[in-house]
Structures are given as structure tokens and as C-alpha cells.
């Protein structure tokens, strides 16, 4: 069976530089993903049982079957769970993913694995939500490599609210002013939790405009996000791919930007010490809202920030700490770990004092 067990890939030293060329993308995906037809008898059995579930759902459910744009009612969600339990569908997709990837997938990054029902998950899996039958999606994904790549992208790099440039204009203005005060100087920045790289390229643009000799790093826990960030890989979104290709060419930033995989709660010490760390969309969000997780993240980030270096954090994806934790909690955690909180126009900012 082609799986992570017999075709492993060590992500510890995996890093990428911007390159929108097709060959660079293919080289990256070849490192991360298993090629060809990955169907085997065990996966066929999984799909056969799931198909039986789906047939019963179609013939028995009293509610209209789900369709894109339809309203998901409590009744429809309950019927979906009775005949198509999300736990069984998640287990089936795990079987596919373990055969597809040369690394162990980070399941919390995929909305499928946090959805309360299959029809809720379908709202997030585009363009595959045109297909209601999970067995059909998995079968085709196992047999068709190109389709599988697009499916993996849809699962692990889903459309998110605010997933674009200029998400935090107040923070951007503050950072632009800071860069302007350091014209002609060399500065090292990190976008921690960089997603598909928009924040990294935004910093690179501002640094170029300010005359700062900047090197910018971006890290995220999901390897396919790194592929999207470094290569402008956005299957099914031609406009976004063209925009990314133009930006990479305009900035000519291959030697000044680096993307790597890391977990900010267990951040590796690679020897770099940063002048500024951006951490947007994470602190206070659904993945990092427990105090212990915030403590771990701030502690690890603090160790890679220079003395008098700065951390900036904002979160609009999930209403951040305004909804889940009070701002004072994050500020107190920062103070506990050797930071001095500063006034910023958006989110939270702090200077490393120890």
C-alpha cells in the first residue's frame, strides 16, 4: 500500500522559496504527495460500505437532498447524521489521505474534520460540493492523481473569510511606519501561521517601498499551504494564480523570502532571531484559544524574537479573543513572557524586553 509508512518524507528541514514556475511546483508536490493510482482492496472496501450508506440516505431521507446554496436546517443535518454519519466519512477520507501523502496530514487544518455533519462539510469543499456522494469523491480521488491533488488542496487550503491581501489595514499602516524608520537597515521578519503567504508578500512589498533590506520568513503547519504560498498554487482560481505569479515576479524575492513548516506552539529554534513577528488569525482563534496553548505559543515565539523586537497579532477570522478570550488575557501572557505591551491601531502589539 502506498502510504506514509513506506514512503515517508521528513518535513523537519522542508523549506521553499518563491517560484511560480510549473517545474518548481511539480518538484514540491512530488516530495509531498504519492503519485498515480493509489486504490487498493482495503480502500475499495471502505468505499463500498460508504456507498451503501449513501444509497440508503438517498432512498430513505425525508428531507430534500443537499444542494449548493441550500439552507442547512436542523432536520436536514440530523437526517444526514442518521444515514451518513460524519465520523464514518471522516474515517474514509483519512484512509484516502494516508495513502495520498508522504507525511502525516494535520487533520485540524481541514474543515471536514471539524464539521458537525457531511452536508456542513460540503459547504467548505469546493468545487467538490457539486458531488454529494462521498464514496464517489474518494473513489475518483484514489484513481485520478490530478483530481486528488485538487481535492487535497480543497481539503487543506479551503476558502476562508478574509483570505486575501490587506486583511489588517491598521496593523499594516503601523508596520509600514516602523519599516520607514529603519530605511537602509537589515531586518528579519517572520509571519507565524502564514497560511498561503499573503502576509509575507505584503511585508516584502512594504519593505521594498521603505528601502529596508528585509528578509522575510513564513511558517505554517500545513505543507500544502506552503506549496500554495511559494508557488502561487490555487487550483480552480485562475485570477488568484495570475495575481500570485505577477507578485512573485514583481518582487523578485526568491532569495529574500523563505517558507517552512513549523508549529508555533512547538516552534523549532533554527538560529534566526527576528526583529518583528506577525501572528495573525491564530491567537484566540479555534485552534489556539486555551490559555495553555496561548502560553506555549507566546513562549516559543518569544525565544526567536530579538531583544527590543516586536510581535504584532490580530484576528478577524473568528472574532478572535474579543469573542473567545479577553484581550487582557493575551496581554498578561505577553507580559509574563518578557514583553511590554504597546498601543497599536489594530490587534495587540508588544516589545520584547528580556
Image (tube, rainbow, N blue to C red):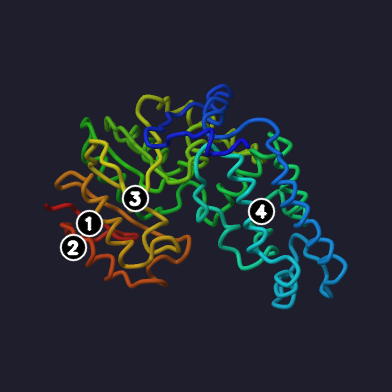
* Residue 171 at least partly seen: yes
Q: Earlier in the sequence, mark 4 or mark 2?
A: 4
Q: Position of residue 41 (x, y in %)?
A: 73, 43
Task: Identify the mark at residue 264; answer none if there is no mark.
Answer: 3
| Image point (17%, 59%), residue name | 340
Distance in Å between CA atoms under marks 2 and 3? 18 Å
Distance in Å between CA atoms under marks 4 and 1? 44 Å
Quarter of the rendering occupied by the N terminus: top right
Task: Identify the mark at residue 350; answer none if there is no mark.
Answer: 1
Q: Residues within 10 Å of mark 2 (few under 14, many from 20)?
A: some
Which residue, given by chain and number where applicable, does mark 4 sit on?
92
Q: Earlier in the sequence, mark 4 or mark 3?
A: 4
Q: Position of residue 213 (x, y in %)?
A: 27, 30
Distance in Å between CA atoms under marks 2 and 1? 8 Å
Secondary structure at numbered mark 3: helix
Q: Nearer the viewer, residue 160 or 48?
A: 48
Q: Earlier in the sequence, mark 4 or mark 1?
A: 4
| Image point (22%, 56%), residue name | 350
Q: Position of residue 115 (x, y in %)?
A: 60, 64
Amino acid at each position: 500500500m502506498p502510504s506514509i509508512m513506506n514512503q515517508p518524507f521528513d518535513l523537519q528541514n522542508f523549506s521553499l522559496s518563491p517560484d511560480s514556475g510549473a517545474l518548481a511546483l511539480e518538484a514540491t508536490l512530488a516530495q509531498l504527495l504519492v503519485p498515480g493510482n493509489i486504490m487498493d482492496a482495503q480502500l475499495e472496501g471502505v468505499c463500498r460500505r460508504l456507498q451503501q450508506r449513501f444509497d440508503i440516505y438517498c432512498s430513505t431521507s425525508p428531507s430534500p437532498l443537499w444542494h449548493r446554496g441550500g439552507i442547512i436546517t436542523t432536520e436536514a443535518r440530523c437526517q444526514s447524521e442518521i444515514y451518513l454519519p460524519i465520523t464514518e466519512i471522516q474515517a474514509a477520507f483519512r484512509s484516502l489521505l494516508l495513502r495520498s501523502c508522504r507525511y502525516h496530514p494535520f487533520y485540524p487544518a481541514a474543515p471536514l474534520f471539524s464539521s458537525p455533519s457531511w452536508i456542513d462539510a460540503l459547504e467548505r469543499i469546493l468545487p467538490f460540493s457539486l458531488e454529494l456522494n462521498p464514496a464517489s469523491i474518494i473513489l475518483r480521488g484514489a484513481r485520478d492523481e490530478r483530481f486528488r491533488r485538487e481535492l487535497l488542496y480543497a481539503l487543506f487550503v479551503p476558502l476562508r473569510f478574509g483570505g486575501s491581501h490587506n486583511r489588517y489595514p491598521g496593523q499594516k499602516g503601523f508596520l509600514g511606519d516602523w519599516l520607514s524608520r529603519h530605511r537602509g537597515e537589515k531586518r528579519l521578519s517572520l509571519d507565524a501561521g502564514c497560511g498561503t503567504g499573503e502576509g509575507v508578500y505584503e511585508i516584502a512589498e512594504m519593505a521594498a517601498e521603505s528601502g529596508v533590506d528585509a528578509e522575510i520568513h513564513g511558517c505554517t503547519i500545513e505543507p500544502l499551504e506552503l506549496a500554495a504560498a511559494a508557488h502561487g498554487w490555487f487550483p480552480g482560481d485562475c485570477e488568484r494564480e495570475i495575481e500570485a505569479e505577477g507578485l512573485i515576479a514583481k518582487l523578485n524575492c526568491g532569495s529574500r523570502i523563505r517558507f517552512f513548516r513549523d508549529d508555533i506552539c512547538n516552534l523549532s529554534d533554527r538560529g534566526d532571531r527576528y526583529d518583528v513577528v506577525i501572528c495573525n488569525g491564530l491567537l484566540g482563534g479555534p485552534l489556539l484559544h486555551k490559555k495553555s496553548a496561548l502560553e506555549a505559543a507566546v513562549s516559543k515565539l518569544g525565544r526567536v524574537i530579538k531583544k527590543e523586537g516586536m510581535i504584532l497579532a490580530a484576528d478577524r477570522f473568528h472574532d478572535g479573543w474579543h469573542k473567545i478570550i479577553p484581550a487582557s488575557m493575551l496581554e498578561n501572557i505577553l507580559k509574563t513572557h518578557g514583553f511590554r505591551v504597546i498601543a497599536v491601531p489594530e490587534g495587540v502589539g508588544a516589545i520584547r524586553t528580556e
